[in-house]
Image: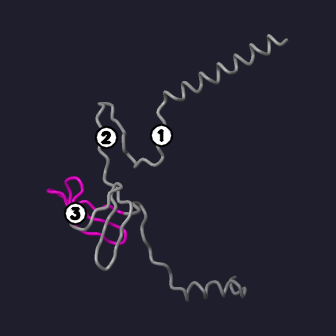
Amino acid sequence: MAGGMTRLLAWCLGISFAGVAAAQTAPLADPTRPPGAGTESAAGKAAPVAARLQSVLISPTRRIAVIDGKAVALGGRIASATLESVTENAAVLRYADRRETLRLMPGVDRRERRAAGAARSDTADSEKGNLR
């Protein structure tokens, strides 16, 4: 019986070490790496990734955009572009042949809220039971 337990233990350890060895050869994804960094296309060249606006810093004396992890001051350069303008939610890059607007939250449209008084009167009517 002891010989059978020893063989079973050796077999389990062998399986677990094989799993560890296989896991060590597979590359791990770095969750802190910027999007698109290190992506390779089928040809083996890095796939071009559009610039991404990550943050804006606006003060009375300066404007800075954080683009792909790099802080760029107004008028500064990133790759072949110049930072032309910075607003609360966008930055404009000027290339030799075009302009590109980077949005802080692409796909999100900003909409104005209803007036607070109108919202309160709707709530008050529903609380009084005036809705039919």
Q: Which residue is under mark 1?
A: 29
Q: Which numbered disc covers residue 60?
A: none
**Residue 87, horizontal then vertical, whole percent:** 32, 71
Q: Nearer the viewer, residue 18 or 45?
A: 18
Q: Secondary structure at mark 2?
A: loop
Q: Nearer the viewer, mark 2 or mark 3?
A: 3
Residue at left offset 55%, top offset 24%? 21
Question: How many numbered marks does the figure carry?
Answer: 3
Q: CA distance from mark 1 to mark 3?
A: 32 Å
Q: Nearer the viewer, residue 73 or 115?
A: 73
Magenta range: 76-103
Q: Nearer the viewer, mark 2 or mark 1?
A: 1
Q: Which residue is under mark 2?
A: 47
Residue at left offset 80%, top offset 10%? 3
Q: Which residue is under mark 3?
A: 76
Q: Mark 3, residues whose alpha carbon is within 10 Å: few (<14), some, or many (≥20)?
A: some
Q: Amino acid at mark 2?
A: Ala
Residue at left offset 52%, top offset 29%? 24
Vertical placement of 70 versus 62: above or below? above
**Residue 36, horizontal then vertical, whole percent:** 37, 45
Q: Amino acid at mark 1?
A: Ala
